[in-house]
């Protein structure tokens, strides 16, 4: 995932008393065309942003945003594979002033809950906070990708959600 700068570890991950895990986060909603400018600003926090992919994601309604006081403060861009089940989480960013509030976790849990198969992402191996968040959600490192980032390797992670 190019947006591993967004990690936060807020939220306790507990479900309700019935044993069901509540994956909804009232701060998360689908991205809207009116959000495009703010999402582009947030994209500047990424190690390797993909403006074309973001434009596509906004056009097809794939982006999910986290909102504080009516303002977009984070986003996640899931990308479906045309010939395979599952989803790849291409970009994830939470604005620096809103990190460690459970926003990345809320975005991730929303997309994981909707996934129809494996969920994959890529993260920088030195981003301990992001890796801890992904591990807490059940992601496992499946591959090291040498030279994937301009400043070094990347780790490919995968989660197979409960059926």
Image (cartoon, helix red, strand yellow):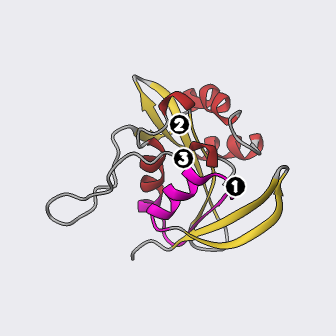
Indicate whether 158 appears above or below 150. below
Mark 3 vs mark 1: which is more N-terminal? 3
Q: What residue did someone put label 2 on?
A: 74
**Residue 126, horizontal then vertical, whole percent:** 68, 54
Query: Vertical placement of 15 versus 7: above or below?
Result: below
Q: Which of disc 2 and disc 1 is earlier in sequence?
A: 2
Above or below — where is 5 with respect to 12?
A: above
Task: Answer whether residue 132 is magenta in the image.
Answer: yes
Residue at 83% in and 50% down: 151
Q: Secondary structure at mark 2?
A: strand
Q: Residue at x 85, y 50 (%)?
A: 150
Q: CA distance from mark 3 to mark 1?
A: 11 Å
Q: Nearer the viewer, mark 1 or mark 2?
A: 1
Q: Which mark is residue 7?
A: 3
**Is 77 on the left or on the right of 117, as rendered?**
right
Residue 29 image position (x, y, % from top left): 43, 40
Span colored in magenta: 112-138
Q: Secondary structure at mark 3?
A: loop
User: 122 or 29, which lies in front?
Assistant: 122
**Mark sitting on residue 124:** 1
Mark 1: few/some/many CA within 10 Å (<14, 14-19, 20+): many
């Amino acid at each position: 995932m190019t947006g591993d700068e967004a990690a936060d570890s807020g939220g306790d991950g507990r479900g309700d008393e019935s044993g069901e895990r509540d994956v909804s986060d009232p701060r998360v909603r689908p991205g809207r065309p009116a959000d495009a400018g703010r999402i582009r600003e947030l994209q500047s926090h990424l190690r390797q942003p993909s403006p074309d992919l973001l434009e596509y994601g906004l056009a097809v309604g794939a982006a999910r945003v986290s909102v504080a006081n009516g303002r977009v403060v984070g986003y996640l861009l899931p990308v479906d594979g045309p010939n395979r089940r599952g989803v790849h989480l291409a970009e994830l960013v939470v604005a620096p002033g809103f990190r460690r509030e459970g926003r990345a976790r809320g975005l991730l849990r929303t997309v994981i809950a909707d996934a129809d198969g494996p969920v994959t992402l890529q993260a920088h191996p030195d981003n301990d906070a992001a890796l801890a968040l992904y591990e807490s959600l059940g992601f496992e490192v499946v591959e090291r990708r040498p030279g994937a980032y301009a400043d070094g390797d990347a780790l490919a992670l995968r989660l197979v959600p409960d059926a």
